[in-house]
């Protein structure tokens, strides 16, 4: 879906923000860019929708150079959620959400229907919220509107630049849960920037860890925690415990389906019983395969839960 090939960015003052970055984001993937302050993660994100022009290399979206897209068409097909939320204060919630659909000349009926659908999707009653102004909403409610505004024209890609970092811990955790559920439903390609490794581990299909403008390691949360590429990765992820990983994050997503299968919400004892005789099983949700789980990975995960007193 999105591919970086030898991408570099040098600002006029000589600062090298991105130094020969290469990676690919798969369609429908939740891809997290993370690293310390000033590492280049936000700059990397902003090159995708051409808010920041690159100095060298090529970025592709669906195998087409982003420079070959009409700038308006490119941005209309990329939703963008900021930390600052940036709702227009003089516009109602409905008017804020409708901006891109109106630019794309949707009918009034279709826009109203889409606003209703999106507000319901994030648990905001359309009749209550559509005519409100941003100032009357809490920070968490405003950020929910920010998220659905990015989804309004049904874009293929969503960029999220530390969208929850300014919120209090309780609201932040709730919105993290909301975005996980939302992604299960909408299956968009999401590129998400954060400096919080626990947030990255909770949300990501894969994590891209950046240091000084260079990619240090790309992999699943499990891989970064248990197979760090170097001491920097090991130190950066040390605050994450094994039990911070969900069972779904332990799965090998692209593996061939095997005969022995079990639902992800099955009791733990059923997993243990199966692993007494099986090396690998396919984990399902609503009878659809999610991925494969190995005995070694599961037992390590389960043993850590016991050690931490959380089993």
Image (cartoon, rainbow, N blue to C red):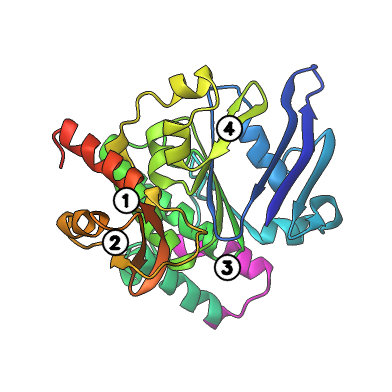
Magenta residues, dominant SS class: helix
**Residue hosting label 4:** 217
Label 1 crowd bin: few (<14), some (14–19), many (20+), radius 10 Å: some
Pick the front one: 76 or 293: 293
Residue at (27, 43) in percent of width and height: 299
Residue at (37, 54) in percent of width and height: 293
Q: State which tag comes first along the sequence, 3 or 1.
A: 3
- Highlighted magenta segment, given as a residue range: 92-109
Real-space CA distance between mark 3 and mark 1, rounded to the nearest whole angstrom: 30 Å
Real-space CA distance between mark 4 and mark 2, rounded to the nearest whole angstrom: 28 Å
Element type at mark 2: loop
**Contact? badges 2 and 3 (CB < 8 Å):** no
Element type at mark 1: loop
Mark number displayed over residue 247: 1
Does residue 276 appear left or right of residue 84 in this picture?
Answer: left
Q: Position of residue 193 (x, y in %)?
A: 53, 38
Q: Position of residue 92 (x, y in %)?
A: 46, 60
The correct choice, above or below, for 57 with respect to 188 in the image is: above
**Residue hosting label 3:** 154
Residue 240, by quadrant, is: top left
**Contact? badges 1 and 2 (CB < 8 Å):** yes
Q: Is residue 45 visible?
A: yes
Element type at mark 3: loop
């Amino acid at each position: 879906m999105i591919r970086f090939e030898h991408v570099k960015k040098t600002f006029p003052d000589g600062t090298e923000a991105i130094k020969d970055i290469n990676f690919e984001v798969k369609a429908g993937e939740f891809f997290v860019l993370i690293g310390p302050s000033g590492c280049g993660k936000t700059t990397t994100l902003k090159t995708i929708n051409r808010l920041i022009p690159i100095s060298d290399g090529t970025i592709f979206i669906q195998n087409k150079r982003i420079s070959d897209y009409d700038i308006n068409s490119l941005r209309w097909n990329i939703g963008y959620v900021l930390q600052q939320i940036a709702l227009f204060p003089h516009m109602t919630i409905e008017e804020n959400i409708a901006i891109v659909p109106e630019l794309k000349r949707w009918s009034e009926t279709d826009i109203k229907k889409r606003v209703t659908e999106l507000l319901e999707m994030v648990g905001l009653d359309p009749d209550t919220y559509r005519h409100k102004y941003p100032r009357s909403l809490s920070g968490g409610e405003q950020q929910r509107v920010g998220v659905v505004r990015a989804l309004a024209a049904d874009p293929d890609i969503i960029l999220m630049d530390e969208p929850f970092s300014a919120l209090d811990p309780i609201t932040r955790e709730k919105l993290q849960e909301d975005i996980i559920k939302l992604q299960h439903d909408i299956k968009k390609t999401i590129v998400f920037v954060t400096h919080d490794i626990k947030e990255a581990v909770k949300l990501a299909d894969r994590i891209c860890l950046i240091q000084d403008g260079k990619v240090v390691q790309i992999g699943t949360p499990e891989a970064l925690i248990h197979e760090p590429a170097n001491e920097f990765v090991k130190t950066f992820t040390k605050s994450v415990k094994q039990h911070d990983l969900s069972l779904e994050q332990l799965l090998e997503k692209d593996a061939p389906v095997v005969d022995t299968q079990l639902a992800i919400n099955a009791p733990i004892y059923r997993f243990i019983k199966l692993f007494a005789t099986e090396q690998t099983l396919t984990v399902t949700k609503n009878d659809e395969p999610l991925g494969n789980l190995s005995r070694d990975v599961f037992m390590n995960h389960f043993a850590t839960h016991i050690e931490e007193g959380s089993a």
